Amino acid sequence: MTACALGAAGCAGRAPGREEAPPDAVARDRQFVVDRAPEDAAPQRVASFGSAAAGHAALQKGDLYGAEDLLERAVALDPGNPFSYFYLAEVRYRQGEAKQALVLLDQSELRFHGHPYWLGEVYALKALCWEKLGSAEKSKAAYEKALEYNPSNRETR
């Protein structure tokens, strides 16, 4: 399951500059994917992206333990790779560990700074975690924040 398939998230209040992100910034973010390391990336980052991409593929197949191993390796190779934290959070969420998923999502959020599409996906998953933890208020806030970052996310709506 990809982040897009998870649903949506939101939050109360707007962060400065978020509402100014043009729609093309969201479209560009969709091309910033785990399968492609940035062109100028160092070898460690390239290896981390490769491991994270393999972890994401395992996650899509439902192999949570295989995905977990690959994504933890991706974090160890490059702690700055936002995808490794994001997909590892999805693993934790699927394992029923919503609190731990939220911690990983916080790390992913820091590393996706400036990427409105991906920040919307982070908050969408945060909303699902808060739902699972029984906090309707925090879940609603996360869904609202997801829509602030990416108003075109139909699943979030």
Image (spheres, grey):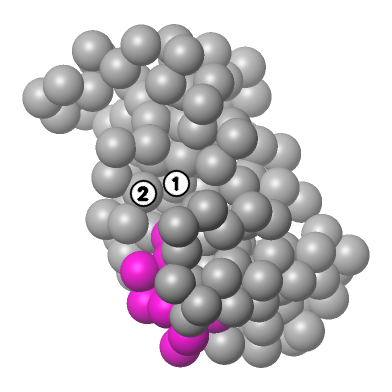
Residue that lies at the very extreme toward the right in this rendered image = 61
Identify whether 118 is placed above or below 27: below
**Is 155 colored magenta in this rendering?**
no
Q: Is residue 152 left or right of residue 53?
A: left
Considering the image in quadrants, where does the C terminus appear?
Answer: top right
Q: Are marks 1 and 2 in contact (CB under 8 Å)?
A: yes
Q: Is residue 110 above or below residue 140?
A: below
Q: Disc 1 marks which amino acid?
A: Val
Q: Which residue is mark 2?
A: 112
Q: Residues within 10 Å of mark 2 (few under 14, many from 20)?
A: many
Residue at the extreme front: 40
Q: Is residue 140 left or right of residue 13?
A: right
> Quick one: 7 or 122, which is closer to the camera?
122
Q: Residue 93: x percent and y percent?
A: 58, 65
Which of the 4 image quadrants contains residue 54? bottom right
Q: Is residue 96 above or below residue 126?
A: below
Residue at position x 55%, y 42% in the image: 32
Q: Over which residues does the magenta segment extend?
A: 74-82
Confirm whether residue 85 shows in the render: no
In front of the other: 101 or 80? 80
What secondary structure is marked by label 1?
helix
Name the residue at 76% across, 51% down. Answer: 1
Q: Which residue is mark 1?
A: 122
